[in-house]
Image (tube, helix red, strand yellow):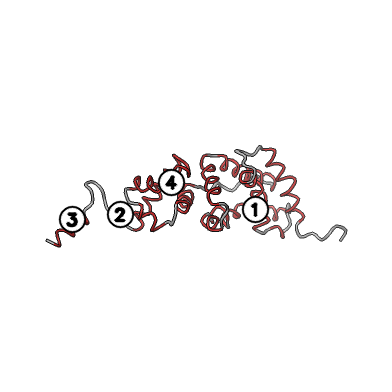
Amino acid sequence: MERDAAAGERRTEPGRTRRRGAALEEAILDAAARELTESGFAGMTMDKVAARAGTNKNALYRRWPHRLALGTAAYKRLATTAPVPDTGTLRGDALELLRQANRHWSSPLGAVLRELLAAAGGTAEFLAGLQDQSGEAAAAPWLTVLGRAVARGEAVPEALHPRVATVAVVLLRNEFVVRGVPSAPDEVLVEIVDEVYLPLVRGRGAGPAGA
């Protein structure tokens, strides 16, 4: 009798498969991504995600300590990587990279990212959670186009540094995060490239004026 009772406790609802481990985590992330797409971060609740995933909130909290952590993981699931441009010039490549970033930040998914940033308040924990978007992976396309530019003689080798390479996109991000603009005009992107980025990467490593 005790064995039959235990078996009954393990029995799931008809037509549903009990999931554990990676399968359950995938189901939760998929549910959270759908909630983000449909309702944004403001409308994504742990209750809604649990119901959509066919599980309970405890399963969510065991994996993600709070809603922001789950929202960040779901955002990373939705984010895609755009191809690295190759226009033949550093200016053309830099402008296209900025235009790709501008399109993303202006999109519904970009709006979700802005919601996440606002909810996090710029905390280190959140930035670490978005490492793929704000760390080495974010610098990779910029280092690629800058490396090609160095080979063509358009930039100095000393410019091949992640902080230098990503200056342009950081300035663009500030337009959204600090100024709160819904989309940056193309003339702003041109100004960032022509007035800040190109002079920086062409002259980095040069001595003081008159040296």
As drawn, 104 above or below 62:
above
Q: Mark 3 points at which residue?
A: 8
Looking at the image, the residue that sits furthest to the right is 210
- Give the CA distance from mark 4 to mark 2: 19 Å
- Closer-to-camera residue (2/76): 2
Q: In which quarter of the image is the N terminus?
A: bottom left
Q: What residue type is labelled 1?
A: Thr
Q: Mark 4 points at which residue?
A: 33
Q: Mark 2 points at which residue?
A: 19
- Give the CA distance from mark 3 to mark 1: 58 Å
Q: Residues within 10 Å of mark 1 (few under 14, many from 20)?
A: some
Dot placed on the residue nearer the N-terminal end, 4 or 1: 4
Dot placed on the residue nearer the N-terminal end, 2 or 1: 2
Looking at the image, the residue that sits furthest to the left is 1
Residue 96 in percent (x, y) is at: 63, 43
Q: Which amino acid does label 4 sit on?
A: Ala
